[in-house]
Amino acid sequence: MRSFRLITLLTFCALLLGACSIYRVDVQQGNVITAKELAELHPGMDELQVRAILGSPLLQDPWHPHQWVYAYSFKPAYGNTEVRKVLVLFDKDEKLVSVQGNVQSAASPTATTTS
């Protein structure tokens, strides 16, 4: 009978201590743009070609229709939030003019490069 009480007490303590841990998940949001994708872009491309390579932009400002913003954030379960932003600019003829911002390199997921 004494061993039954001991097993019951140990089981109760294990369940009680297990409830103290908090499970956190990694949160990834936005567009992941790699250096390989940016290497495919060149000035003079139209908006459809850019959209085919990078996908739809996360933000399109109604007051600046020739400016697309590709934003990305990654919040690891235990750590600092990483935020990246790529700005794609077009001229009035809807042709690509420039690309600015930081991206994820294809080789290292934590490295950032500025282009």
Image: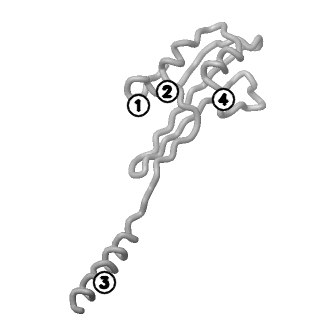
Label 4 Cα crowd, 10 Å radius (few <14 / some 14-19 / many 20+) = some
Spot occupied by residue 55 in the image (x, y as percentages of width and height): 64, 25
Residue wearing tag 4: 57
Label pair 4/3, CB-CB below 8 angstroms: no
Residue wearing tag 3: 8
Query: How far is disc 4 from disc 3 in space, using C-alphas?
Result: 57 Å
Residue wearing tag 2: 102
Q: Earlier in the sequence, mark 1 or mark 4?
A: 4
Tell us which disc is closer to us: 4 or 3. 3
Label pair 4/2, CB-CB below 8 angstroms: no
Q: Earlier in the sequence, mark 1 or mark 2?
A: 2
Spot occupied by residue 28 in the image (x, y as percentages of width and height): 52, 42
Q: Is mark 1 on a helix, strand or loop?
A: loop
Residue wearing tag 1: 109
Please, what is the three-letter code of the amino acid marked with disc 1? Pro
Q: In the picture shown, does residue 48 fall above or below 3?
A: above
Label 1 Cα crowd, 10 Å radius (few <14 / some 14-19 / many 20+) = few
Label 2 Cα crowd, 10 Å radius (few <14 / some 14-19 / many 20+) = many
Q: Earlier in the sequence, mark 4 or mark 2?
A: 4
* Along the line of sight, the residue nearer the viewer: 85 or 46: 46
Label pair 1/4, CB-CB below 8 angstroms: no
Q: What element carries label 3?
A: helix
Spot occupied by residue 89 in the image (x, y as percentages of width and height): 65, 19
Please, what is the three-letter code of the amino acid marked with disc 2? Asn
Please, what is the three-letter code of the amino acid marked with disc 3? Thr
